[in-house]
């Protein structure tokens, strides 16, 4: 028996072969393309070209070619795109691991490069495998709230996605025609261009190839069923046992819906949010400034909006009934009768997105509010009391809680 993994006879599984690899590759071709597109959409939703406050990605240059003003219609847009991105990413993990297992003999093949073209192909495979493992691993850590990265998740995942997808696209261009031929000849397992995947001395099979695909598919369905529920409310959320924001809703009553950061975690004390101490500072044209307490805000024209909250980590809530002052009305108080951008700052002193910028189209939307109450009652401390921003279709971190200052004008 050969002892070196560089020998084809070292790998004895009878499951490996062109058809098995091609089926997994076809699934990943579709799934990873959807992941890449929804990931770019999520990046655009942060309005990274609006203000350096929102974008921690240095020197993105041409990688920001597709950016556009993030829309506010429909209000559930980010809930859908990010829910698909996170849930699909988790569900594809068994498929990715099975695909890597099916082609592992090629990683040890000798010589490392038979020609310049072969060397370039091996390099693309290194970027493909390394990039894929990096993206899926960092994505899982992020949704599990394990921020153990050697830097900010935001730029790491962004740049990793471009490296991975570039290698994935090159690999797909090279291999898709062969994969389609293999799928058309389901029983053709003779060595060919992919012959190194077929063992010259296979062991006795314990499961068929279709059975192995069933195991992989079952694993994906299991992960789907234990993750997808956090994009819903009620009993379905309790099925998301693998997600930190799954399980029962946090508390009951009008404020008993999902949150990310609590007031205690953010260091918000009752003394600074009390009616006597808290004031909202609104600044606008030519430095015009007003200071408003909650009683003054409650005397302004109040409006209601039914809007969800959706987080980059994949969880979301259904529509909650928010009530407060329209952002465009606050802009008008300080001299901006037309649509303008706004920089929102929180009482939170540390952590990412304690400041966030919103585009003029988001400010102009009549459903965009500085919310003072939700579902018929005052905001709870964990939901942003005394006031928070709520904007249709915006990522959760742009719906700033514990608002202290708003500066309207071009950013």
Image (cartoon, helix red, strand yellow):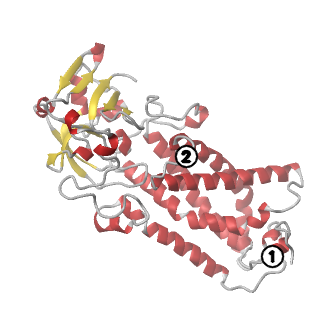
Q: Residues within 10 Å of mark 2 (few under 14, many from 20)?
A: few
Image point (20%, 28%), residue name = 279
Residue 179 shown left or right of residue 338 in the figure: right
* Rendered-image quadrant of the C terminus: top left
Identify residue for label 1: 199
Residue 274 shown left or right of residue 391 in the figure: left
> How far apart are the two marked residues, 1 and 2, measured between alpha carbons?
39 Å
Q: Does residue 248 sit above or below 77 in this rendering?
A: below
Q: Is residue 191 visible?
A: no
Image point (51%, 64%), residue name = 91
Q: Is residue 91 visible?
A: yes
Identify residue for label 2: 149
Residue 200 shown left or right of residue 253 in the figure: right
Q: Residue furthest top?
A: 286
Residue 52 shown left or right of residue 332 in the figure: right
Measured as percent of width and height from the top left, residue 289 is found at: 24, 18
Measured as percent of width and height from the top left, residue 370 is found at: 23, 36
Image point (74%, 79%), residue name = 14
Q: 59 or 383: nearer the eye? A: 383
Name the image quarter holding residue 129. bottom right
Judge depth for marks 1 and 2 and give the one in front.
2
């Amino acid at each position: 028996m050969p002892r070196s993994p560089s020998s084809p006879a070292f790998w004895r599984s009878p499951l490996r072969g062109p058809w098995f690899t091609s089926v997994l590759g076809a699934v990943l071709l579709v799934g990873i393309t959807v992941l890449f597109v929804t990931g770019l959409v999520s990046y655009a939703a942060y309005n990274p070209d609006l203000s350096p406050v929102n974008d921690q990605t240095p020197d993105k240059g041409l990688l920001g070619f597709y950016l556009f003003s993030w829309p506010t219609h429909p209000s559930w847009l980010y809930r859908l795109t990010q829910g698909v991105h996170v849930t699909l990413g988790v569900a594809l993990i068994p498929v990715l691991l099975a695909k890597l297992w099916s082609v592992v003999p090629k990683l040890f093949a000798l010589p490392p490069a038979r020609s310049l073209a072969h060397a370039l192909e091996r390099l693309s495979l290194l970027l493909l495998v390394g990039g894929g493992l990096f993206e899926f691993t960092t994505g899982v850590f992020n949704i599990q709230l394990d921020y153990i990265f050697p830097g900010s998740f935001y730029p790491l995942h962004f740049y990793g996605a471009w490296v991975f997808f570039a290698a994935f696209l090159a690999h797909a261009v090279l291999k898709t025609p062969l994969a389609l031929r293999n799928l058309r000849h389901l029983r053709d397992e003779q060595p060919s261009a992919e012959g190194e995947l077929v063992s010259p001395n296979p062991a006795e099979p314990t499961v068929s190839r279709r059975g192995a695909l069933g195991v992989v598919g079952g694993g994906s369905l299991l992960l789907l069923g234990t993750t997808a529920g956090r994009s819903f409310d009620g009993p379905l959320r309790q099925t998301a046992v693998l997600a930190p924001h799954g399980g029962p809703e946090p508390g009951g009553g009008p404020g008993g819906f999902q949150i990310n950061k609590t007031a205690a975690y953010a260091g918000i004390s009752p003394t600074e949010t009390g009616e006597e101490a808290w004031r909202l500072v609104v600044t606008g044209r030519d430095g015009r400034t007003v200071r408003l307490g909650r009683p003054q805000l409650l005397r302004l024209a109040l409006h209601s909006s039914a809007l969800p909250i959706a987080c980059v980590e994949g969880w979301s809530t259904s529509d909650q009934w928010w009530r407060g002052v329209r952002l465009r009305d606050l802009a008008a108080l300080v001299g901006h009768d037309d649509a303008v951008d706004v920089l929102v700052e929180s009482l939170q002193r540390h952590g990412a997105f304690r400041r966030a910028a919103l585009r003029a189209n988001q400010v102009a939307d009549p459903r965009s509010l500085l919310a003072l109450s939700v579902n018929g009652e005052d905001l709870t401390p964990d939901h942003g009391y005394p006031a928070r921003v709520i904007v249709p279709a915006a990522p959760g971190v742009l719906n700033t809680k514990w608002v202290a200052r708003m500066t309207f004008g071009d950013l």
